Image (cartoon, helix red, strand yellow):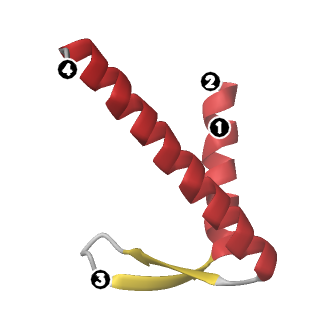
C-alpha cells in the first residue's frame, strides 16, 4: 500500500469515526441520556449528551463564522 493510499484510508477511518460519534451523541441527546467522557486529568466524567451536543454545535458554528 502506497503512502497516499494509507493517508486516504486514514482519512476515511477518521471521517467514519467522527460521523459515528456525531450519530451516537445525537441519539443519546434525543433520548435524554448521559455520556461518559474524560476530563483533563483523564478521570471519567458523566455529562448530559445534550450539553455535549450544544457545545459541539457552538464550536461548529464559531468555525463556520471564521
How crowded pointer 2 is (Cα within 10 Å; few <14, some 14-19, many 20+) is rated as few
Q: Measure the C-alpha gap from mark 1 to mark 4.
A: 38 Å
Residue nearer the viewer, 34 or 27: 27
Residue shown at the point (26%, 24%) measured from the top left: 6
Q: Measured from the top left, where is residue 29 in percent x and y?
A: 73, 73
- Marks 2 and 4 sit apart, C-alpha to C-alpha, by 37 Å
Which is in the foreground here, disc 1 or disc 4? 4
Give whichever of discs 2 and 3 has the lower sequence position. 3
16 relative position to 7: left or right: right
Query: Which residue is disc 4 drawn over?
Result: 1
Please give the residue where the numbered disc 2 appears in the rendered image: 66
Q: Which mark is residue 43?
A: 3
| Cα separation between marks 2 and 3 | 33 Å
Instruction: Give the Cα distance between marks 3 and 1.
Output: 28 Å
Q: Are marks 2 and 1 in contact (CB under 8 Å)?
A: yes
Q: Earlier in the sequence, mark 4 or mark 3?
A: 4
Label 2 or label 3, whichever lies nearer to me, is: 3
Q: Which mark is residue 62?
A: 1
Q: Secondary structure at mark 4?
A: loop
Nearer-N-terminus badge (1/4): 4
Residue 54: x and y in percent read: 70, 61
Camera-nearest residue between 13 and 57 = 13
Image mark count: 4
10 Å crowding of disc 4: few (<14), some (14-19), many (20+)? few
Where residue 53 sits, quadrant-wise, is bottom right
Q: Is residue 5 above or below residue 57?
A: above
Q: CA distance from mark 2 to mark 1?
A: 7 Å
Residue at left 35%, top 74%? 39
Tag in front: 4 or 3: 4
Amino acid at each position: 500500500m502506497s503512502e497516499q493510499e494509507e493517508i486516504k484510508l486514514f482519512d476515511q477511518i477518521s471521517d467514519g469515526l467522527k460521523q459515528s460519534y456525531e450519530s451516537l451523541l445525537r441519539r443519546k441527546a434525543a433520548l435524554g441520556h448521559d455520556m461518559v467522557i474524560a476530563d483533563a486529568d483523564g478521570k471519567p466524567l458523566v455529562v448530559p449528551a445534550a450539553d455535549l451536543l450544544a457545545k459541539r454545535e457552538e464550536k461548529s458554528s464559531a468555525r463556520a463564522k471564521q
